[in-house]
Image (tube, grey):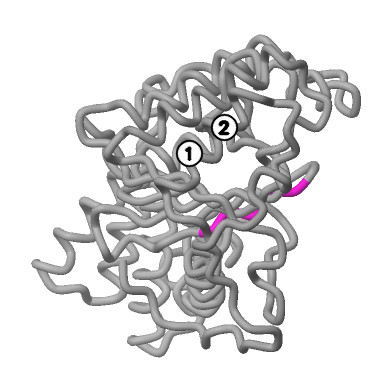
Amino acid sequence: MPLPTSPVIRRARLGAELRQLRRREELTLEQVCDRLGWASTSKLSRIELGQSRPDLADVLDLLDVYRVGPDERDALIVIARDAATGRGWWKTLGGMGERQRAYAELEAGAATVVEYQPAVVPGLLQTPAYARLRLGVARLLHPEVDVEADVRARLVRQEVLHRPEPPRYTALLELAACDPGGVPDGIWREQLRHLVHLAGRPNVTIRVVPPGATAGGAHPLTPFTRYSFPDPADPRTVMLEALTTDVRLVSPADLGWYDAVIDRLLDAALPAAETAALLGRLADDPSLPAAVDLGGQPSVRSRPEGAALPRPRQPQD
């Protein structure tokens, strides 16, 4: 069965709800903290920003200050309890580093996941050998990386795609992600065949974005992943992946732009069936450059040069 919505998402939702209630009562952070006898506003600020695990007693005190009615109060208490969940929830994910844990927590509670990767195979789709190779490269920059522990953690994360009620997962891959780029032949063949196998799952969609398909409009410069959750009131989230850290975005304005970018990528990408056929051909002959193998595909529906990027839209998931 799917895990309950992750604590970080519940914390973000709870913080937004409490901030809205405070503003409804026309109270400042200072005024609320004075009423509750809190030493400074930092505690309330961190709760509203979803940056700390809330104490249920503090939340109950805030609901009293904001004069919340019984029905709304009960609903917020449920969210607060989810937000305060601790070690018991984390044990379901196994042992993993902080960065992988952040992704695993979002994946575990997600209803849909859309991932864009410009250069490498996404972590949820990697074979152990390919993951070990990628993490070995990372260790050159960060000697503290425990490669084998991270490989095991990645395999734990991948279980989310195989549970009885998995999220709907879509991977949008630039053509460079389908090129071996120095990966040994045997490891690359295994990885490509693994992608073809996963693409056959009803909850997994893999599509290749041909070169130049998004010319004339905004184009992602970094990998990113968009998550939506079973409860539509939980904030949809975009994670931006950088070399040393990751950025979590939850504002409707940010999500609107990434929705528009995803729409553009989906419009330009090869259909899933043609992507699977392309990956299969490359697995049979890894020496064939992906760009050559793609040449002449009639299904590439790139926009005309200068076509405008769609305007950001409000979240629909």
The majority secondary structure of the magenta stretch comes to strand
Q: Residue furthest left?
A: 71
State the image coordinates of residue 40 (x, y, percent, origin top left).
60, 64
Q: Is residue 69 positioned above or below 176 on the image?
A: below
- Image quadrant containing the C terminus: bottom left
Residue, x 72% and y 37% (percent of image)?
179
- For label 1, the SS is helix
Which image quarter: residue 106? top left
Count neighbours of disc 1 (C-alpha within 10 A) and say few if under 14, some if 14 to 19, many if 20 or more: few
Of residues 149 and 11, the one nearer the viewer is 149
Of residues 133 and 281, the one nearer the viewer is 281
Can residue 246 be seen at all in this image of the molecule?
no
Instruction: Please name the amino acid that badge 2 sits on.
Output: Arg
Q: Which residue is mark 2?
A: 281
* Residue range corresponding to the magenta coloring: 238-242
State the image coordinates of residue 257 (x, y, percent, origin top left).
56, 76
Q: Is residue 308 magenta?
A: no
Residue, x 34% and y 86% (percent of image)?
25
| Residue 17 tag number | none
Instruction: Please name the amino acid that badge 1 sits on.
Output: Ala
Q: Is residue 278 positioned above or below 208 on the image?
A: above
Residue, x 46% and y 39% (percent of image)?
276
State the image coordinates of residue 193 (x, y, percent, origin top left).
51, 23
- For label 2, the SS is helix
Q: Which residue is mark 1?
A: 277
Q: Is residue 37 positioned above or below 179 on the image?
A: below
Q: Is residue 67 positioned above or below 64 on the image?
A: below
The reply, left or right, for residue 294 in relation to residue 244 is left
The reply, left or right, for residue 46 in relation to residue 90 is right
Q: Do the residues bearing badges 2 and 1 touch, measured as CB atoms within 8 Å?
A: yes
